[in-house]
Amino acid sequence: MAETKNILEMRGITKRFPGVTALDQVDLDIRQGEVHVLVGENGAGKSSLVKVLCGIYLHDEGEILYEGTSYAPQTTLDAIRAGIRVVYQEFNLLPYLSVAENIYFERLPARGGLVDFRALYRDAKSVLDEVGLDLSPKTPVEMLGVAQMQLVEIGKAISTESKVLILDEPTATLTPKEIDRLFGIISRLKAKGVTIIYISHRLQETFEIGDRITVLRNGRKVATENIGGVTIPEIVKMMVGKEMGAEYPFKEEVVPGEEIFRVDDLRHKGNRHGVSFGLRQGELLGIAGLVGSGRTETMRAIFGADPRTSGRLFFRGKEITVKRPRDAVQHGICLLTEDRKTEGLILDMPLSVNITLTDLAQITRGGLLQKRLEKNAAEKLVEDLSIKTPSVNKWARYLSGGNQQKVVLAKWLFRHTDVLIFDEPTRGIDVGAKYEIYLLLWQLAAEGKGIIVVSSDLPELLGICHRIMVFSNGKITGVVDRADFSQERILSLAYQEYIGQSPLQEETR
């Protein structure tokens, strides 16, 4: 059988930025019609490599061959015209336009010189059905959740006749059912001869979908292997340069204490169900559920980011009033949102500002900002959280996704809050950084803080939490203690309100 030809060949690709070599003599061959997995820690060079392929960055050294001829895109439009398309981890959607307009923005159907909206909505509905997104194509993108935006981005990419499709963390916010549908789409594209470059920190899923895997570390290629020829521990060792222990650390010695926070019959706009639960001191309480189950909306209502229609909050046994985020912060409650770029960071400000803005009183004297105090506080948290940056003066925009997430965490640690709500805390973070985050969560729990973790990654919740509370269609369908943990049990509760059955009954406590 003839060997499959290469559609892409990269030879000695080098990309430098002031003080940093992002890519260092990288060689990479991509075969036509394969799913080629690209892995590495945050800052390993994955994003830089993709941006070189897509015309966002111009490489300093090396050459690229695409379909056997020299390829050097000057703009993203050059890459799109060549048949190379990317679904980025950070979305590239226009919030005030409809889903349909976003999908077909570059090629809106026209009739008589005007947009043919009937054709636009019809075609967009077919794309939405393909990716399993049940909503009107007329819906403004600003009304969507993060997972829904992810599916719109995927739909936008597959609606074109691309030869190479690059997927950057496509499953970060998707449920198992949605992931299965995505894998089915990838299989169909592969059967048509489309080449997929698949970037993911979820190593297990790469074994389900990939043909070959390339590992990058510190801007260099470590190895390219057939998926069947390596194991996950071997890949992790290549990524981080050392052996690692268990993926999900659980600290038996951290035992939850008395209740620190309680939510009583909380309701928010669009949800008629009252939500009640308690959080104990030193506890990691996981929140599971399908996309649209009400997990994120409930946490935002608790924090005052979205209005409540009813309900009471209690902190250390006393009722508190939270009408806006400032009220929550003053009572020692913080929320790390799932969208770190638009809601968690000021991208065009230095790390020192981002980290210390939650408590300016600590770094001011007589009403004046003390730059030395700001710098010292930021540098300590950068060191404590192993944030990779040449300086605390660097803008947050230029950090990798994982390091940006650590900066969001740093700003709340600077505030010394007692109740921390994490919404998708490890989304887009590599395996090494995830482990560091997990250990940090346990350190905070050991200090007596109450921690809520909302995650689409069910194995993550099963691996690190004392209890898991399950949402389904806006209501809590069960709370499962660690001794009773199982994927089947959690998923059964997650689907309970959607299938109209009650396979398990749990009382929230």
Image (cartoon, rainbow, N blue to C red):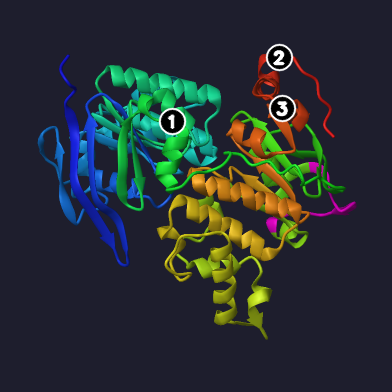
What is the x, y in percent for residue 57?
25, 53
What is the x, y in percent for residue 37?
35, 33
Give the number of the mark in front: 2 or 1.
1
Residue farthest front in this picture: 243
The answer to whether any part of residue 91 appears in the image is no
Which residue shows up at 40% across the image and 59% down it?
398
User: Would you name the residue on which mark 1 appears?
Assistant: 231
Distance (Cα) linking label 3 and label 2:
23 Å
Front residue of 257 and 340: 257
Pick whichever of labels 3 and 2 is earlier in the sequence.
3
What is the x, y in percent for residue 399?
43, 58
User: Would you name the residue on which mark 2 appears?
Assistant: 500
Task: Tell me the kind of residue under disc 3.
Answer: Phe
Residue farthest right in this picture: 317
Task: Tell me the kind of residue under disc 1.
Answer: Thr
Distance (Cα) linking label 1 and label 3:
26 Å
Magenta residues, as a range?
Answer: 310-325
Instruction: Using residue 279 as the reference point, say whether residue 201 is left or right of it.
Output: left
User: Would you name the residue on which mark 3 appears?
Assistant: 485
**246 inside magenta stretch:** no
Instruction: Using residue 418 as the reference point, say whether residue 100 is left or right of it.
Output: left
- Image quarter where the N terminus lies is top left
Which residue shows up at 48% across the image and 45% down it?
430
What is the x, y in percent for residue 132?
48, 22
Secondary structure under tag 3 reads loop
Which residue shows up at 52% across the image and 31% down it?
174
Secondary structure under tag 2 reads loop
